[in-house]
Amino acid sequence: MKRSLSGIKSTGIPHVGNYLGMIRPAIELQNDHEAFYFIADYHALTTEKDGKAIYDSTLSVAAYFLAFGLDPSKAALFRQSDVPEVTEMAWLLSSVYNMGSLERAHSYKAAKDLGKANELNHATFMYPVLMAADILIYNSDVVPVGADQLQHLEMTRDMASRFNAVYGELLKLPEAIVNENVATVPGTDGRKMSKSYDNTIEPLTTSKKLKKQIMSVVTDVKTLEEPKDPTHCNVFALYKLFATHDEIETMKGNYLAGNYGYGHAKLALFEKMDAYFTPFRENYTRLIENPQEIEDALTLGTERVRPVVEETMEKLRYAVGVGRRK
Ligand code: ADP
Ligand code: TRP
């Protein structure tokens, strides 16, 4: 059975882009893959300095996976930091990877372009190396992610190849899995939905807040009577992700005919999303009130992945020449 692995940072609450781009496809893979999914709390440190916020977010993100149907008896769900060997592995990869390649990372360039030189920490520079360690330490075959992670996956393959060229064929080159329809889910302002842009929709918030977030989706200023262009509308783009083929066709007809306002479209979008997420919301609320249940799932997950980690690290330490030899 192939192994599927992915991670998501514990920086706040997941949004609809995280859900459609990563959480849902990852959970689907648990049925015919050996699934390893973790909450990237070490990666969260690059931007979040409030320890309590990282801790709380880790539990919330884990609760999201469980609420959406991750089955801890099938898939391993765990904290990145419960496997501290990934930081050791990152050091080994660091030693074969050159600075020039890391300087080309979009994540680093974006942080640098923000112009806050004093906030540009070394962990941000090293981010892709730790991510490569996350993937390679588990001998992963496939990595379900949104399109924004493709460059990191390329760098991971590159690091594995360089490591293998130096030390022999020890690391497996993984493949990214990106689902075309949801590769980049738009946010309320039409840009990629992202925690960094403050344009997110939170799937498991209360109905009231969900409605408010949907009502804030930006549209053009056409009057109620005017025909509207569905191909250039954020509300329609989001509706397409939740509605059936027939419902999409009906909404398209409404847009083109006129006498259909953006308020109507937003209400239809809210009703679709609210109906879709309500059952999961109930699971989430129950879990978040029982943190021990979440921790138990994380413990189980860590126990599942540990033998794989130990095997990889033993091989790598031997190959590079660190540690004791038995
Ligand atoms: P953010 O960009 O909000 O900080 P993360 O970097 O934590 O989100 O992303 C976690 C996962 O969700 C990654 O696999 C990423 O590719 C995916 N993802 C994030 N935003 C989107 C989006 N708007 N559309 C599709 N996938 C997304
Ligand atoms: N960089 C990913 C993100 O921002 C999170 C992540 C960390 C990850 N390690 C990973 C994703 C390993 C896939 C595999 O979303």
Image: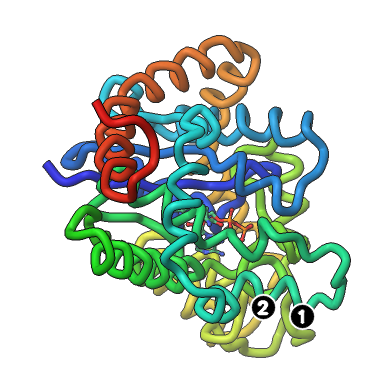
**Quadrant in the picture for residue 123:** bottom right
* Mark 2: amino acid: Lys
Question: Colour scheme of this structure image?
Answer: rainbow
**CB at disc 2 and ligand 2 closer than 8 Å:** no
In the picture shown, does residue 70 fall above or below 233? above
Left or right position of 108 against 307? right
**Quadrant in the picture for residue 145:** bottom left
Q: Position of residue 72 (x, y in %)?
A: 35, 23
Residue at 56% in and 24% down: 282
Q: Position of residue 57 (x, y in %)?
A: 67, 34
Q: Which residue carries the number 2 mark?
A: 109
Foreground pick, 36 / 250: 36
**Quadrant where the N terminus lies?**
top left
Q: Are marks 2 and 1 in contact (CB under 8 Å)?
A: yes
Q: Which residue carries the number 1 mark?
A: 113
* Mark 1: amino acid: Asp
**Quadrant where the C terminus lies?**
top left
Q: Quadrant of ligand 1?
A: bottom right
Residue at 54% in and 28% down: 63
Disc 2 is placed on an element classified as helix
Foreground pick, 67 / 48: 48
